[in-house]
Image: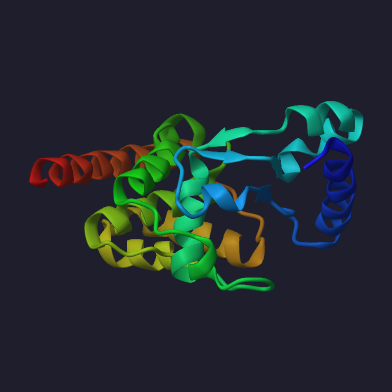
Amino acid sequence: MSDADKRAYMGMVVDLSSQGPAKGIEMSVVKQSVCKPFAYPIPFELHFSIAHLDWYRNDPDDYVSKMKGKDKDLAAHFTIINHRGKCLYGAPIKDTFADVPIQDYIDSIWEDVANAKDEIADNPMYLTLNLARVLAYLKDGVVLSKKEGGEWALNNIPERYHSLIYNAMNDYAEGAVITYDSIFAKEYAGFMLEQIVKEQWIGTYAE
């Protein structure tokens, strides 16, 4: 994509994001050539999330010239697309995206939660549910939505943490104003990370 094309595309995305849910639109542009066959870490041509909105508005030329590179997180998104995605336009998903190797997916989802104990106070809903999704995959091999991750956690982790899970699920589903206990959330993150590391070690040992 030329920088001019990126500017035009970003103008459309920013306009649409303001009309969407509070969390806005997050998207990445990638080349077909890195989707099938799969390349890891995945190169991307352009990325946008609401976290970068001020940067784009203040200096769009700088944004479009620098917002490119490689992103391990896209392996998780590709996996979700393959398992749960819906094609809105164009070629079918299976014709577009190759299967993501298991170890690349695990590396991607681990990277997303590895610092959860330090970061959960700043992003409690996301990390509470994502920790559950990661552990669910490592224990049961299931690829879940955030909602389903919360439901899985209610059936598989100690009851002590259920109130936190319920709060995160309500926050995600309804955008409810939730006050999180940051100390308790860090305790939960520490517990979940211990379980995740244990499952990763067992999986590596078994191989």
Residue at image location 45% in from the left, 52% down from the top: 37
Q: Is any atom of residue 184 visible in this view?
A: no
Q: Nearer the viewer, residue 187 or 195?
A: 195
Above or below, comparing residue 100 to residue 5 in the picture = below
Residue 116 left/right relative to 71? left
Residue at image location 30% in from the left, 45% down from the top: 103
Residue 29 left/right relative to 164? right
- In which image quadrant can residue 99 be found? bottom left
Residue at image location 69% in from the left, 72% down from the top: 89
Residue 125 locus on image (x, y percent): 54, 51
Residue 75 locus on image (x, y percent): 46, 48
Q: Nearer the viewer, residue 124 or 45?
A: 45
Residue 73 locus on image (x, y percent): 50, 43
Q: Quadrant of the N terminus?
A: top right
- In which image quadrant can residue 150 be found? bottom left
Q: Quadrant of the C terminus?
A: top left
Q: Is any atom of residue 18 visible in this view?
A: yes
Tally of numbered discs: 0
Residue 107 left/right relative to 85? left
Above or below, comparing residue 184 to residue 83 in the picture = above
Residue 97 locus on image (x, y percent): 50, 60
